[in-house]
Amino acid sequence: MNRTPKRLSLPKLALFGGAVAATAAVSLFGPGLGRVRAALQDSPKAVLDEAWQIVNREYVDGNFNHVDWQATRQSLLSKNYTSKKEAYQALRKALEQLGDPYTRFMDPAQYRSLTDQTSGELSGVGIRLEVNEKTKALTVVEPIENSPALKAGIKPGDHILSINGKSTKGMSVEDASNLIRGDVGTKVNLEIRRPGTTDFTLALTRARIELPTVRYSLNQEGTRRIGYIRLNEFSSHAAEQMRKAIKSLTDQKVDGFVLDLRGNPGGLLQASVEISRMWMDQGAIVRTVDRKGKSEEITNNQTALTKLPLVVLVDGNSASSSEILTGALKDNGRATVVGSQTFGKALVQSVHNLSDGSGLAVTIAHYYTPKGTDISHKGISPDIKIDLTEQDRKQLASNPKLLATPKDPQYAGAISELERIILAQPQRQNPEKQAINLEK
């Protein structure tokens, strides 16, 4: 969350990012705690003690930010809680003492949302929604590929008037999404308004949907064929989607690539490692240091899919796994980085599911780029710095179709740099012509 000759010894689903995935349940009560366990069973205190012990065992700072962590446990377990909500609040307050926003408790709903996010899947009908700025109507942005919504004929621009008979007037995208999602095989009724037709209702059967986290296109920029790839998050499906994108664009004979990591908050370690290895044959990817000072490194393994020129786009919201990938490509001289200073998150979390369905994210290590740079609170400096003006940001936010066009200053800068790199390279010869020259 493999390298030769050593493997990273962090938990399998440790993560480098704002997004995280759950580890399997672990034994949380050590020797001599049997009586405590029996006393806490079926009590809100049970979850508090589970969480406390995970932090006690794994948290990256063995001094716990100079907090008496044993006294914190005593304080948590000495109180009487009238509800789980009250116990959750006490736990969150205890974790705040660590001064680490990434070590955090999630109630069951938050934990389910997080695991859905990192799995790259959800159970629903497969539509992206927005609240239209002008009409304030809940509007379909697009149906997802191979989804029930696409198969039923839902189109971009359709207005969702009601969900299972409940009006969507004034409803947020989040609330609407929660109503549309549900168990696989169950049905949801959507009332649709489409210009030129009378309002109609569709009964859709929910299914397991793989969310697209990679989008790509062949962009003709002057005489150059550019492979543009945008990676939104390092989910469990990100690597396979990235592989498909690189292979498809390579087959279309592109001259180089632009990898857009702007706005990417991070995600799973395994995804970032696999994607790094698609672009580089050799060199280190990242080095981690745990609470005991043990340092380990993950490296590339001769599995790159392309050696074509590469420019990476980043901004202030490119964080964690995005910074790992960017740092690896930059430090190994594999890519030129264009855009704004990145976020600056150099911490690794693992996530545990607790006995009542809630979850706990715990920071377990620091990481460093291949050249040993600590990017904490600093981020990665682009090779070519291009900051968007406030007007640029508003224009791109109001019209996302302008991204990766000449109206996008950072993308335009990436294309200019890619052109320079291509021109500076020796001309690639036709293999057959090269063989004839060698025979002469």
Image: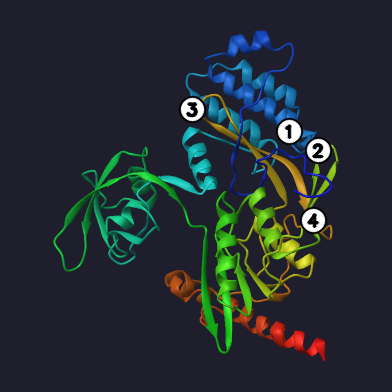
Frontmost residue, 71 versus 420: 420
What's the distance in space between the residues labelled 4 and 3, CA to CA? Answer: 38 Å
Rendered image coloring scheme: rainbow
Task: Give the amino acid type for the residue marked by disc 1 in the picture.
Answer: Glu
Pointer 2 residue = 291
Label 1's element?
helix
What's the distance in space between the residues labelled 3 and 2, CA to CA? Answer: 31 Å
Pointer 3 residue = 85
Pointer 1 residue = 58
- Tags 4 and 2 touching, CB below 8 Å: no
Q: In which quarter of the image is residue 159?
A: bottom left
Q: Quadrant of the N terminus?
A: top right
Mark 2 or 1 closer to N-term?
Answer: 1
**Are there few (<14), some (14-19), or many (20+) residues within 10 Å of tag 3?**
few
**Are there few (<14), some (14-19), or many (20+) residues within 10 Å of tag 2?**
some
On screen, 9 above or below 424? above
Foreground disc of the pair 4, 3: 4
Task: Give the amino acid type for the residue marked by disc 4 in the picture.
Answer: Asp
Pointer 4 residue = 374
Frontmost residue, 419 versus 177: 419
Residue 273 location (% of width, % of height): 69, 53
Residue 198 location (% of width, % of height): 13, 61
- Tags 2 and 1 touching, CB below 8 Å: yes
Tell me the residue at 44%/73% (across/down).
401
Label 3's element?
helix
Tell me the residue at 80%/34% (across/down).
62
